[in-house]
Amino acid sequence: MAKTTNQEIIEFWRDKPAPLLSVLHDFHDRDGFISDEVMRQVSVGLKVPLAELFGTVTFYHHFSRMPPGQDAPRVCMGPVCLLRGSKRILNQLEKDGAVPMPCAGRCDDTVPVLKKGQVLTGLDSGTLSIQPSPLPEPNPGGAEECIFASIREINRSSIQGYQKFGGYQGIGGIVGRMQPAEVIDLISQSQLAGRGGAGFPTGLKWKSVAEAENNPKTVVCNADEGEPGCFKDRAILDYDPHAVIEGMIIAAYATGATRGFIYLRYEYPETFKVLECAITEARNAGLLGDRILGQEFSFEIYLRRGAGAYICGEEGALLNSLEGKRPFPRNRPPYPVTHGFENLPTAVNNVETSRTDSPTPVRNPVEYSM
């Protein structure tokens, strides 16, 4: 659907889950910035107080309030890029209104410059060009891999390629064949832990969501990878998106969730397109939507994009961002497993957890027990 007028954009998103960021991105992509008039119309259309909306929009690094806005080059000033001469590029692009931005997660292909929704890389302004997302090199000496295991298989990012290498077998083996509690038991027996930093047991998190009383329940994949020097999630999502989707579907089946979100950082526009395609492929294959694999199990994944806020990597801030609020961290307790998205039970897992923890132990939990 082509959305051209302000009202068309607002009406398109109004009744969809977590609409505000998507509405703002559509306006920002169309106009290059978010005007006062747009703010007023969004405030009325989505019933968000104008003062709250102003606080939300101005919180994010990449939402511009005036021209040249999105047309101005944004040059990465992360530590790796600084060592590769990003200040020189910033000075070279000064005439174009260039502004600095925090680490853009392209440390393996410096220096990234974000302009008009595209990432260009190069070591000076004259060599900037659009390049494919770099594929991580194998471990030296043939050492066994974990995070990037299998992502170099040819065409793995497509559903046909993923299924060729055993993809979605985990779903086929559990939906309609195992009880959700049995899936959680397998995850718990494998002693797998979350990989967002705290190492919380994944099985315990899923069990807490499954046992929570309120509905609907939600699964969230935290792909707001913002630590300077980090780009592992980008590589996984670019080259193995269906493994993350499969993990989220299994998490949904185990917890009773009916909706899921992938919250992706703003600086990965190419990854956004990869995920859009992968979600559509999974839906067309009957792996998302109503009655998955013909069973009484329905689950949908929605893709949402951040706008440049390091704090959104923290799960409470991320949930507030999804809800269209200013993304401040939440006080805990209560925890997301009982009071997450829209104050309802929510399992928040990061990209590594969604990809590695979920499909693999369901296929062979003994092999992956610790």
Image (cartoon, rainbow, N blue to C red):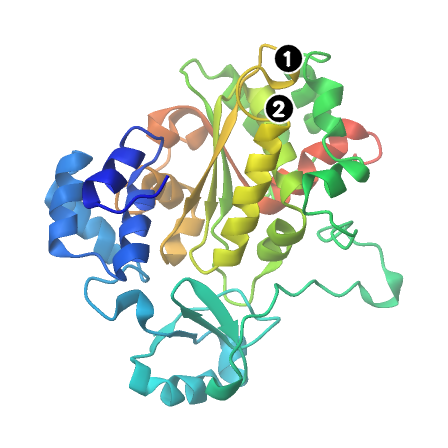
Q: Amino acid at mark 1?
A: Gly
Q: Nearer the viewer, residue 244 or 40?
A: 40
Structural crowding at the residue carrying mark 2, measured as other residues with C-alpha within 10 Å and reported as few (<14), some (14–19) or many (≥20): some
Residue under the point 80% across and 35% down = 166
Disc 2 secondary structure class: loop
The spot of residue 58 in percent (x, y) is 22, 57
Give the percent coordinates (x, y) of residue 195. 60, 46
- Residue found at the very far right of the displayed protein: 141
The disc at residue 286 is: 2
Q: Is residue 334 visible?
A: no
Label annotation for residue 272:
none
Disc 1 versus disc 2: distance between alpha carbons?
8 Å
* Residue at screen point 23% across, 53% down: 57
Q: Is residue 249 visible?
A: yes
Q: Within the image, what quadrant is residue 193 found in?
A: top right
Query: Which residue is disc 1 drawn over?
Result: 294
Mark before the other along the chain sequence, 1 or 2: 2
Marks 1,2: beta carbons within 8 A? yes
